[in-house]
Amino acid sequence: MRRVRGIGITAAVMACGLVLAGCGDPPAEEEEGGSSEEAFQACMVTDTGGVDDRSFNASSWAGMQAAAEEGDNIEVDYVASENEQDYEPNLSEYAEQECGLIVAVGGLMADALTVVAEQNPDQQFAIVDALVDLPNVYSMQFNTAQSSFLAGYLAAGMSQTGVVATYGGMNIPPVTIFMDGFVQGVEHYNQTQNASVRVLGWDVASQNGTFAESFTDATQGQAITETFVGQGADVIFPVAGGAGIGTATVAQESNGSLSVIWVDIDGCVSLADYCDVFLTSVVKNISDAVRDAVLAAAEGEEGGSYIGTLENNGTFLANYRSDVPQELQDQIAQLQEQIIAGEIEITSPSQP
């Protein structure tokens, strides 16, 4: 397990950046009685992708860092889960340390968090990408079907072959919600533009499709991508965390024949070397949600829930690549207004 202690001061946040590997020795903890005001401790347990996954764990850690920088006397800490068996022990260890707030990252951690939260009813928890209906848990969910609908429309509008594709890391609701929205966005493009763009990798009706069975295996992501390219796909939407880097690699080597739509975090920020292959990114604004959760907990707020949408900037499309036509951008902007107004309904069994 990897642990980083006491980085609540602004200088440490700025020096360490999004990923803390390579940071110097953490500051020594103050001796008892050495401070007139005890710092608020916010502690985070990552999913198996690690804090530098360039996806939802990295976004969550950025939110923790932002809270430490913006809040009054807040210190943040994380531990990385190497496998799913680490979830419950990691959460329990933080509960024993009496952190002010313990943030669990990822829907896969919901069951473990439920167990630990029930065992520690006086401890405050939060979770990203799941609803845990307990009074001491703050749940953060995101209706990314909305932004993925826009991404699907974009993919269809940019495809030259008439074939686009998507795949996931695992067949779980926080993943398939993206895929549902993406397919429906392509379908909407076909209906309104008299087109016939096909989608590989996901069937909304059966809720079955292609999965890497990993959020870290870029080799598997590359193999899936090469299969899709062989079937004619020229735009691919990997909802697979670090496994999606395999798709970006294939696109970078394709001499412009393959484009990618990244997920969770702006790919041009997290994967700057691959920026040229990204049409856009479907951003899940986890960082702001986590930041706000920590700041609220530090002020004494308990429990509750949050759903990120297009309307509240909880999810959105990042900047477009320069070759996306203005007409297509304008169409997507209009679609966003229609979704917010309720004029376009997007349905997914995974929506919060």
Image (cartoon, helix red, strand yellow):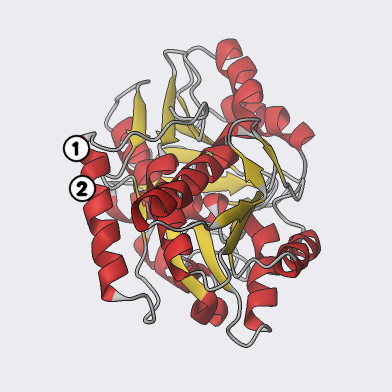
Percent x, y for residue 270?
51, 68
Q: Nearer the viewer, residue 152 or 309?
A: 152
Percent x, y for residue 202?
64, 44
Q: Which mark is residue 156?
A: none
Seen at 45% across and 39% down, the residue is 41
Label 2 residue SS: helix
Q: Using a 10 Å C-alpha cutoff, classify the residue at mark 2 as few (fewer than 14 neighbours), some (14 to 19) or many (20 or more).
A: some
Label 2 sits on what residue type?
Answer: Glu
Seen at 70% across and 46% down, the residue is 48
Q: Is residue 111 left or right of residue 194?
A: right
Marks 1 and 2 in Cβ contact (< 8 Å): yes
Label 1 sits on what residue type?
Answer: Ala
Q: Is residue 137 left or right of residue 246?
A: left
Q: Residue furthest bottom?
A: 255
* Mark 1, residue position: 341
Query: Is residue 24 positioned above or below 238 on the image?
Result: below
The quadrant of the picture occupied by the C terminus is top left
Label 1 residue SS: helix
Percent x, y for residue 248?
63, 72
Query: Is residue 12 positioned above or below 79 on the image?
Result: below
Q: Nearer the viewer, residue 204 or 189?
A: 189
* Mark 2, residue position: 337
Query: Is residue 133 positioned above or below 87 on the image?
Result: above
